[in-house]
Image (tube, rainbow, N blue to C red):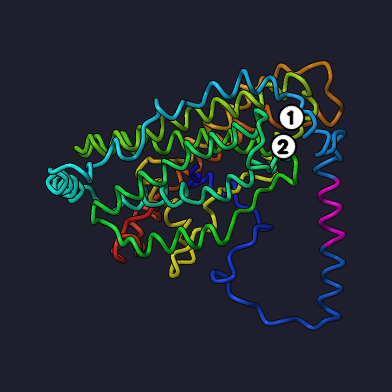
Amino acid sequence: MVMMSGLAAAYSVTPTGTAPSSCWKTRAPQPRVAFQRRRRTTSLTTATATATAMPREAMTAPEKADVLRSLDGWAESNLLPLLKPVDRSWQPHDLLPDSASPGFHEEVDELRARAREIPDDYYVCLVGNMVTEEALPTYHAALNSFVGYDSPSSADAWSRWSRGWTAEENRHGDLLNRYLYLSGRVDMRRVEQTIHHLITAGMRLAVDKCPYRGFIYTSFQERATAISHGNTAARAKALGDASLARICGAIAGDEKRHEAAYTRVVDELFARTPDAAVRALEYMMRQRILMPAYYMFDGKDTDLFHNYSAVAQRLGVYTTADYADLVEFFVDRWGVAELGPGLTGEGRQAQDYLCRLPERVRKMAELDARRRQQPLHLQPRQAPFSWVFDRQVELQA
């Protein structure tokens, strides 16, 4: 898993998110009467806006979970084959110096020599990707909640997928963590603190217990992750480190398979219950997808996620244009424009909104790119990153 950056980050952040208490300043308490009046007013305003923007859906979250559970046989045939058997899967050991080899120290010296030639901004992106991958316990719990299975020994297809997906994802954080440790280029204690903070903070998954929204979220996330790791692989190769490129490329390959799986799930939901599916997609796009690592914190920088995202945007690891491509891809993939019979009035409204959305997001991305080219924004901005020993790293203007 990974986060989106730039416009995508701005587009995905909502004021209803809750940040870790260590990151936010506390406001002085307001008088009780004034607070109660404001709370009643805010609640009425929010309720009215929500009722206007989001009509009540015909299918409840439990009913949608029942649809998913009814697809157990489908999942057996369409999801489980996308998991690789353990004996055919790469392991972190395969891509790093062999600690049992007589030449281990020489191999590590070569790895560190290559690492010294790679700039700090690349390592900021690599650490951000790794930290996100290491919050896997949060993602595993969220995935289990979508269909309602939480037994560690269940033999149904959904549970086996959840465990298999988690096992494959677990290698990603392990591989990047060990590489970064061996490279000597980052402050590992600060990186480890960031992981600790992120798992403790959790994530805001704005799906309201709806499994349809959950699988839409994972589809977006896996595709974004594949793009991000693929771009770090390409950049490592351009910088002359073929070994690091293979590391990032191996992870990107996994993420593409996982994207295929979750996208197939949503394909099936659109085929079986198009009205509920298109309204779930509209909900996620209106609510905006909050990235899983939005709450990352290193104990120092309260703007860490935004600063990391700005570096990723500047290097082309994940950009506003990538996010626009993502929205367009899924609206097209799930055939939103072709949906016809079976849609309610609210479903047709959702269809209309979604068909217009890719163009809107693309225009926002283009406006953002033009803004960054203005003279006002040509002066580079920098920020210190504790991950690289508080050295200054250039951000996107």
Q: Dot 2: within a 10 Å radius of its alpha carbon, few (fewer than 14), some, or many (20 or more) residues? A: many
Residue occupying the point 67% across, 39% down: 214
- First to last magenta residue range: 43-51
Q: Residue at x 81, y 28 (%)?
A: 347
Residue at the (22%, 42%) spot, across then down: 97
Question: Is the Cβ of the residue at disc 2 closer than 8 Å to that at disc 1?
Answer: yes
In this rendering, would 268 be left or right of 375? right
* 155 on left or right of 239: right
Going by the numbered disc 2, the residue's amino acid type is: Val
Front residue of 184 and 311: 184
- The vertical placement of 166 against 395, above or below, is above
Tell me the chief SS of the magenta region.
Answer: helix
* Residue of label 2: 147
Q: Earlier in the sequence, mark 2 or mark 1?
A: 1
Q: Position of residue 29 (x, y in %)?
A: 72, 81
Q: Is residue 48 above or below residue 158?
A: below
Q: Amino acid at mark 1?
A: Leu
The x, y position of residue 81, in whole percent, is 54, 21
Q: Residues within 10 Å of mark 1 (few under 14, many from 20)?
A: many
**Residue 337 colored magenta?**
no
Q: Which residue is mark 1?
A: 68
Residue 321 visible in the shown view? no
Query: Which residue is at a point 41% across and 33% down the rendered structure image?
Result: 252
For residue 5, say whether it is visible.
yes
Query: Hey, which quadrant is residue 34 in on the image?
Result: bottom right
Image coords of residue 272 (percent x, y): 77, 20
Image quadrant of residue 188?
A: bottom left
Label 1 secondary element: helix
Could you say which is closer to the camera, residue 365 or residue 26?
26
